[in-house]
Image (cartoon, helix red, strand yellow):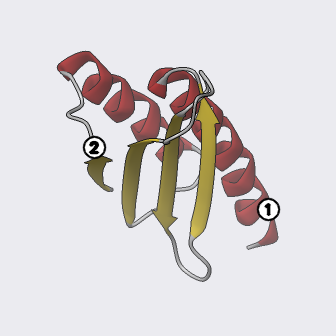
Amino acid sequence: MKITVQSIGLTPHEPLESHIEKKVSKLETFYDKIQDCKVFLKVENNTDRNNKTTEIILVVPGEDIVVKKTSATFEESLDLCVDTAKKLLIKKKELA
């Protein structure tokens, strides 16, 4: 699986990039047909503290899986995305 990280309006630091790599690569254990993974990081323009948005797009046979979460830190929003993607991948594998 190829992992691409794009950040809009910020430069991700090394610990964040390794956190993304570690978390997203675990998704392959739940569904082995993931071809590509795109991770988008964005800081929303609002006054709320929960303004760090992470979006994960998993390219799989059939419909792509898209998960988007917003929270106080990128690590937290990434963890929420990965948890949701994991559930969707398990459901997709059971239906296949």
Q: Nearer the viewer, mark 2 or mark 1?
A: 2
Q: How many marks?
A: 2
| Residue picked out by circle 1 | 94
Against 16, residue 78 (above or below) is below
* Image side of residue 20 versus residue 47, left or right: left
Q: Nearer the viewer, residue 84 or 96?
A: 84
Q: Of the residues shown, which amino acid type is indicated by label 2?
A: Gly
Residue 85 is situated, as x and y percent measured from the top left of the image, at 64, 48
Which disc is residue 9 wearing? 2
Residue 70 is situated, as x and y percent measured from the top left of the image, at 61, 37
* Image side of residue 22 versus residue 74, left or right: left
Q: Of the residues shown, which amino acid type is indicated by label 1?
A: Glu
Q: Residue at x 39, y 57 (%)?
A: 37
Residue 44 is situated, as x and y percent measured from the top left of the image, at 49, 42
Q: Residue at x 39, y 50 (%)?
A: 39
Distance in Å between CA atoms under marks 2 and 1: 38 Å
Q: Residue furthest top?
A: 15
Residue 2 is situated, as x and y percent measured from the top left of the image, at 27, 56
